[in-house]
Amino acid sequence: MDWSYFDKFEGIIDKYMPMHGEGDTMASQAVTAVNKLIYKWYNDGDVFDTTYNLKGWVNDLSSFANWLAKYAQGAEDILNGIATLKSGEKYEELLAELADLILTEDYLEKLPTEKQGSIYDCEGAYRYIEND
């Protein structure tokens, strides 16, 4: 899998992704959080949790994954898959599954219109631990 897989979500990104920040709706928050996870992997090699087998660079992704697990129905089951991943290829499959779930008009239209918490400051099970 490669970055081009995610081209099919371009219309959703254009519609829901805010120019800056996380936006004013839960749909914009969800799109921003998923987009951050995908972009940071393909651009920097960052993963949202380094306590398992995959190691990444210094990152700020844990909060995005924690927010999705807390507020986006179905996301936690996908994100929990990181515990058993042993390769970047499998991580890309996890990201694709997450995008396929959340980056659809049907999914986003069902979300509450109000923002929920902050994607930039959400505690939860996922965390980054820097290994020497």
Image (spheres, rainbow, N blue to C red):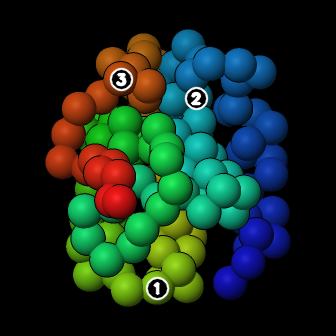
Q: Earlier in the sequence, mark 1 or mark 2?
A: 2
**What whole-number distance in Å separates the C-alpha atoms at marks 2 and 3?**
16 Å
Mark 1 or 2: the one toward you: 1
Q: Earlier in the sequence, mark 2 or mark 3?
A: 2
Residue 121: assigned label: 3
Residue at the image position 30 percent from the left and 28 percent from the top: 122
- Asked if residue 132 lies left or right of residue 105, the reply is left
Q: Nearer the viewer, residue 61 or 79?
A: 61
Q: Position of residue 31 (x, y in %)?
A: 58, 40
- Asked if residue 18 lies left or right of residue 66, the reply is right
**Which corner quadrant of the image does residue 5 belong to?**
bottom right
- What's under tag 1, amino acid-wise? Ser
| Number of other residues with Cα within 10 Å of mark 3, as a class: few under 14, some 14 to 19, many 20 or more | few
Q: Position of residue 73 (x, y in %)?
A: 30, 48
| Number of other residues with Cα within 10 Å of mark 2, as a class: few under 14, some 14 to 19, many 20 or more | many
**What whole-number distance in Å separates the C-alpha atoms at marks 1 and 3?**
28 Å
Q: Circle 1 sits in a helix, a strand or a loop, which is it?
A: loop
Residue 7 drawn above or below residue 62:
below
Q: Which image quadrant: the N terminus?
A: bottom right
Residue at the image position 56 percent from the left and 13 percent from the top: 24
- What's under tag 2, amino acid-wise? Ser
Residue 33 drawn above or below residue 122:
below
Residue 52: assigned label: none
Residue that numbered label 2 is attached to: 28
Q: Are marks 2 and 3 in contact (CB under 8 Å)?
A: no
Q: Nearer the viewer, residue 20 or 49?
A: 49
- Residue lying at the far left in this picture: please name it: 125
Residue 87: assigned label: 1
Is residue 123 in view from this perspective? yes
Residue 103 drawn above or below residue 30:
below
